[in-house]
Image (cartoon, rainbow, N blue to C red):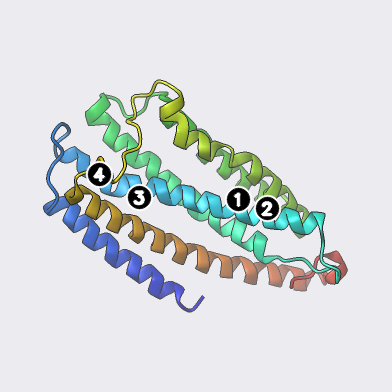
């Protein structure tokens, strides 16, 4: 965890470099002009959001596995629940940025800030479902029940992640199909890739620090409630 501030600082540095290249070095798009430059933060925001939610999926599966096949000493691997909480919170934050950036891009290109396009709709549903998981956690006080219910609802919410990715291929959409490195000019791909790593490192730093906060908060609550190993003591 001591490395997280350094990882975050590296991410910010990459974002500054990538954004500078995207704004002042990379050429404007042939059809959209300078408005296309928002892509250098919009697309990495989308990638980072999905990475965070995928981390929450792994954490949810880890907790569920511990419930199905508990440790012989009766202790629980609370790190899975800490990682789930932190990754969802960070994912929701980047998801909100993704939606706002998309609306800014949509106005000059589509003429409206919002339309119930399949891509936009699935992103909105995905965001709201993970917000609902966080809301559920705030309403359940008992640690084991909160962790279990959060894991199960996370598995349900994650169904939306592949729907977001494939929505432009499965349904008629105003949103363009995902580009690849072969279909993008290298001068455009370069700042996009730099910002992608920048967002990723910032997200890793946020998740690492937030996981530490979740662990300390949980340990304080469990110590105050005198919860022993048989009731779900921390490992």
Residue 101 seen by the camera: yes
Q: Are marks 3 and 1 in contact (CB under 8 Å)?
A: no
First along the sequence among labels 3 and 1? 3
Name the residue that disc number 2 marks.
61
Real-space CA distance between mark 1 and mark 4, rounded to the nearest whole angstrom: 29 Å
49 versus 11 height, above or below:
above
Real-space CA distance between mark 3 and mark 1, rounded to the nearest whole angstrom: 20 Å
Q: How many labels were placed on the picture?
A: 4
Real-space CA distance between mark 4 and mark 3, rounded to the nearest whole angstrom: 10 Å
Q: Are marks 1 and 2 in contact (CB under 8 Å)?
A: yes
Question: x, y (%) of residue 145?
Answer: 77, 53
Describe residue 18's horizontal placement relative to residue 143 as left or right.
Answer: left
Name the residue that disc number 3 marks.
44
User: 141 or 122, which lies in front?
Assistant: 122
Q: Secondary structure at mark 3?
A: helix
Describe residue 85's horizontal placement relative to residue 191 as left or right.
Answer: right
Q: Residues within 10 Å of mark 4 (few under 14, many from 20)?
A: some
Q: Are marks 2 and 4 in contact (CB under 8 Å)?
A: no
Q: Secondary structure at mark 1?
A: helix
Q: Residues within 10 Å of mark 3 (few under 14, many from 20)?
A: many
């Amino acid at each position: 965890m001591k490395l997280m501030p350094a990882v975050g600082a590296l991410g910010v540095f990459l974002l500054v470099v990538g954004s500078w290249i995207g704004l002042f070095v990379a050429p404007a798009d042939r059809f959209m002009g300078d408005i296309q430059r928002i892509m250098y933060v919009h697309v990495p925001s989308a990638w980072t959001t999905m990475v965070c939610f995928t981390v929450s999926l792994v954490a949810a599966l880890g907790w569920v596995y511990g419930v199905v096949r508990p440790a012989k000493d009766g202790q629980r691997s609370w790190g899975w629940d800490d990682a789930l909480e932190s990754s969802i919170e960070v994912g929701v934050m980047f998801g909100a940025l993704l939606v706002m950036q998309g609306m800014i891009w949509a106005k000059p290109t589509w003429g409206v800030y919002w339309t119930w396009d399949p891509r936009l709709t699935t992103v909105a549903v995905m965001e709201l479902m993970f917000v609902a998981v966080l809301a559920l956690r705030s309403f359940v006080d008992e640690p084991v029940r909160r962790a279990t219910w959060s894991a199960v609802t996370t598995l349900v919410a994650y169904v939306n992640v592949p729907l977001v990715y494939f929505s432009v291929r499965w349904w008629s959409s105003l949103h363009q199909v995902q580009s690849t490195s072969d279909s993008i000019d290298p001068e455009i791909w370069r700042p996009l890739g730099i910002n992608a790593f920048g967002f990723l490192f910032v997200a890793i730093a946020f998740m690492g620090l937030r996981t530490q906060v979740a662990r300390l908060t949980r340990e304080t609550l469990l110590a105050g409630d005198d919860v022993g190993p048989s009731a779900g003591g921390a490992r």
